[in-house]
Image (spheres, rainbow, N blue to C red):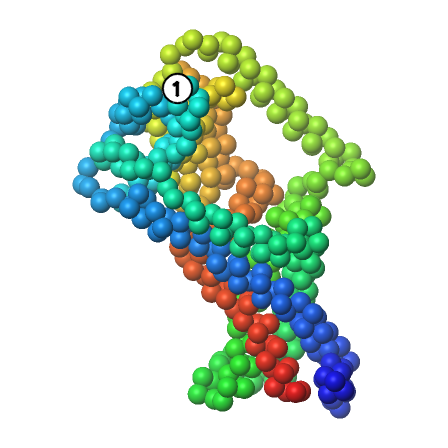
Amino acid sequence: MNKILKSLLRKKRRKESWFKYSMSVLHLWLGLLSSVVIFIVCITGSIYTFKNKIIDIYNYDKVYVSAENKPFLALDSIQAIFKEKELNISHVNLPYQANKSIIVSYESFDSLKAGSYYVNPYSGKILGSGDYSLNNFFTIILSLHRSLLIKNIGRDIVGVSILIFAFMLLSGFVLWLPKKWKQLKNALKIKWNAKFKKINNDIHVVFGFYFLIPLIFIGITGLYVSYPWVKSGLIVAMGGNPVLTANADEDTTKELSDNFARLLAEMLEKENEKESMKGEPEISLDSILNLANKELNYKAITSISLPNSEEPRYVVKKINRENWLRALLPDVISFDKKGNLKTVDLFKNKPLHKQFIEISLPLHTGEIMGWPSLIFYFIATIIGWLLPVTGFIIWWKKNL
């Protein structure tokens, strides 16, 4: 017991500055305090990163089809197939890959049945519904990731641990900095042919350096998703106004009032549209797709939501990858039942803070650039849970 206590409060070395000594002690204490939580958060994050890909593979025979050297079947033909089965289409998700099926959401004529089917894009054959039994597993993984399965208190524990982790990464960087530039080259390499103790130490410090910024970024975006005060801080930093509070300033209140006024005006316009368009024949799905492709002239994953009792318009979303990062950025347009263009909401035209709000979740999960970012995030989260493990081993081997 005495040995453990001594290891937790070591003596200051002769030439060691008080700053580095304090950083070292805090790095140890906070690391031991948060290590289990960080391990759980990172390992669940590395699993959850591939949720959608795993579910697609689990439903391989429905998600993937044989690519054919011909265009997809007309959406109107697919709609006719569903009408024969007394099903109304409510939503269509079109892939940009030639070997993936279309996902069609439907509702029965009597409104007693609703769901979604995978459809062969070349033949229109209904391949069946997906098996989403794995969702229960991923729900548990997500709950572990966010709150350790203990709801409100767990969310706070995770939040504090992420803040500690950010400090650990920064303090680790300070402790890692070589005293001389000549030592920098060796400080950036892992000596794989050394003994276990040296390899473990190198993994901790070298990977901690290389993944410093990615891990802090993932942590901050996670806090953004979970905590309003973090959200407010980041939005303000990007030129927006904070989340409204009792002490909100005049500019913030005015912006929110303006936003509410615009929302109210849009709602009234839609209500008038419902009345004026009542009984009018709807433009075909293929016509809507052609109009959307003229407005958004690029190949992309495309989703079409059809008019319903709540929404009188066709809403088309295309995931734009026409950028140097190949990031998945949403562009949304809408049409009335006659095909008149009503709204155009392009990602590139939004202010920075609204762009960040739009893509904050895929930025955190790693889905923002597809496979390249998913793989990078997976590696980063593996490093994330390796850091507390290797750090604990360093402390254990050195002191016990």
Residue 108: percent from left, percent from top: 39, 23
**Foreground residue among 152 and 123:** 152
Direction left: furthest residue: 69
Left or right, 367 with respect to 86, comes to right
The image quadrant where one finds the N terminus is bottom right
Q: How many marks?
A: 1
Q: From what the image shows, is residue 27 above or below residue 252? A: below
Residue 88: percent from left, percent from top: 37, 23
Residue 48: percent from left, percent from top: 49, 55
The residue at 47%/21% (across/down) is: 308
Left or right, 20 with respect to 344, comes to right
Mark 1 belongs to which amino acid?
Phe
The kind of secondary structure element at disc 1 is loop
Residue 107: percent from left, percent from top: 41, 25
**Foreground residue among 58 and 11:** 58
Q: Which residue is mark 1?
A: 109
Residue 366 can be seen in this image: no
> For mark 1, does the 10 Å Cα neighbourhood hold few (<14), some (14 to 19), or many (20 or more) residues?
few
The residue at 42%/45% (across/down) is: 132
Residue 275 can be seen in this image: yes
The residue at 72%/84% (across/down) is: 4
The image quadrant where one finds the C terminus is bottom right
The residue at 18%/41% (across/down) is: 69
**Foreground residue among 372 and 118:** 118
Left or right, 101 with respect to 222, comes to left
Q: Quadrant of residue 259?
A: top right
